[in-house]
Image (tube, rainbow, N blue to C red):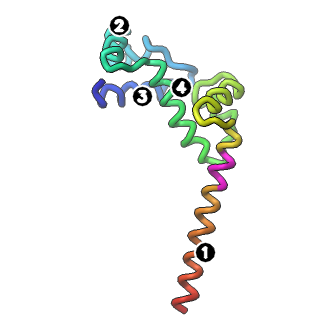
Amino acid sequence: MRDVLRQRIEREIRARLEDGAPRLAEVAAALGLSPATLQRRLAEAGAAFSEIVDATRRDLAGDYLRQPHRPLSDIALSLGYSELSAFSRAHRRWFGVPPRGNRYSTDAVARQAASSTSSICSGERKRSA
């Protein structure tokens, strides 16, 4: 599949996620294609609509979990899941840990990076002083 078509499909999926799992027919209509044409193009590229939806959700989940102020239930709804439990199962399938565990590990990595940077900066200041 051409990258341009995949990007257009992903953009349409993102635009519809908050309303639930997007349907192929809705995305096809937004792209000016029939559902059959979209399915054929996906099949020619060895891709499936459900796989693109899943990958889009996974990528967005990673981005949203880096926002510590954002509640997990809000993230689940933003990704088109009707319940937090459905999002938790998907997250565990994608990353091998529940979303809360991933959020904490992401926060820990960010704190560690910030701490390392401040230690390096303060060490440089001491040497230059």
- Local secondary structure at mark 3: helix
Q: CA distance from mark 4 to mark 3?
A: 10 Å
Q: CA distance from mark 1 to mark 2?
A: 58 Å
Q: Earlier in the sequence, mark 4 or mark 3?
A: 3
Identity of the residue drawn at 48% across and 19% down: 50
Q: Are marks 1 and 3 in contact (CB under 8 Å)?
A: no
Q: Main secondary structure of the magenta part?
A: helix
Q: Would residue 60 appear left or right of 31 to someone viewing this image? A: right
Q: Earlier in the sequence, mark 2 or mark 4?
A: 4
Q: Would residue 73 appear left or right of 122 to someone viewing this image? A: right
Q: CA distance from mark 1 to mark 3?
A: 41 Å
* Residue named by callout 2: 36
Say which quadrant the C terminus sits in: bottom right
* Residue named by callout 1: 119
**Amino acid at the residue labelled 2:** Ala
**Residue lying at the far front of the rendered structure:** 96
